[in-house]
Amino acid sequence: MFENFQNEILFAARLLLGGAFVFAGLRNIQNRPLVASLMAARGVPQAKLALWLGIVLQVVAGALVIAGISIAPAAAGLILFLVVATPMFHNFWDHQGPDRASRINGVVSNVALGGGFLALIVNYL
């Protein structure tokens, strides 16, 4: 049934996955003082520079995924971003109650995003 729509479905997947990171990167630009201070508090050296590198990776790799250009390397870069950012911003082990649950949900969401990117990598190798 869906075989006739494979290209359209893959585009929708790329739009949703890549778009999430373009959106997050743009949001991080607006929130950079807060995000940089959180990163510094977590011990990230040169937090402002690391933040800008992360923003560029999010926006550029997300846009490449959407555009269908260098999808596998862009998706791999976003998986690497998730591996680094997830324990930094979703440190549920340091929290209790609803805040802990929210951070656990963030980890689960990032794992799911990583799974989506792995599926794209396999499809576009």
Image (tube, rainbow, N blue to C red):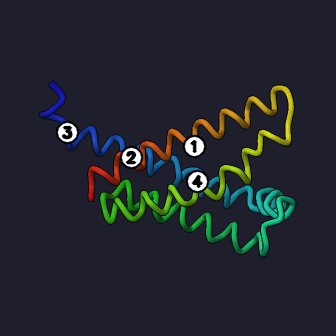
Q: Nearer the viewer, mark 4 or mark 2?
A: 4
The residue labelled by disc 1 is 110
Q: Nearer the viewer, mark 1 or mark 3?
A: 1
* Residue 30 lies in quadrant: bottom right
Give the residue type at disc 2.
Answer: Leu
The residue labelled by disc 2 is 15
Q: Is residue 33 left or right of residue 83?
A: right
Question: CA–CA distance between discs 1 and 2?
Answer: 17 Å
Question: CA–CA distance between discs 1 and 3?
Answer: 25 Å
Question: CA–CA distance between discs 3 and 2?
Answer: 14 Å
Note whether 103 is above or below 122 in the view shown: above
Q: Is residue 10 left or right of residue 91?
A: left
Note whether 64 is above or below 118 in the view shown: below
Residue 74: image location, x then y, percent: 42, 62
Mark 2: which secondary structure? helix
Asked if the residue at tag 4 contacts the one at tag 1, i.e. Cβ–Cβ closer than 8 Å, the answer is yes
Q: Residue at x 51, y 47 (%)?
A: 20
Q: Nearer the viewer, mark 3 or mark 2?
A: 3
Note whether 27 is above or below 106 in the view shown: below
Asked if the residue at tag 2 contacts the one at tag 1, i.e. Cβ–Cβ closer than 8 Å, the answer is no
Q: Residue at x 78, y 67 (%)?
A: 44
Asked if the residue at tag 2 contacts the one at tag 4, i.e. Cβ–Cβ closer than 8 Å, the answer is no
The residue labelled by disc 3 is 6
Question: CA–CA distance between discs 4 and 2?
Answer: 18 Å
The residue labelled by disc 4 is 82
Give the residue type at disc 4.
Answer: Leu
Question: CA–CA distance between discs 4 and 3?
Answer: 27 Å
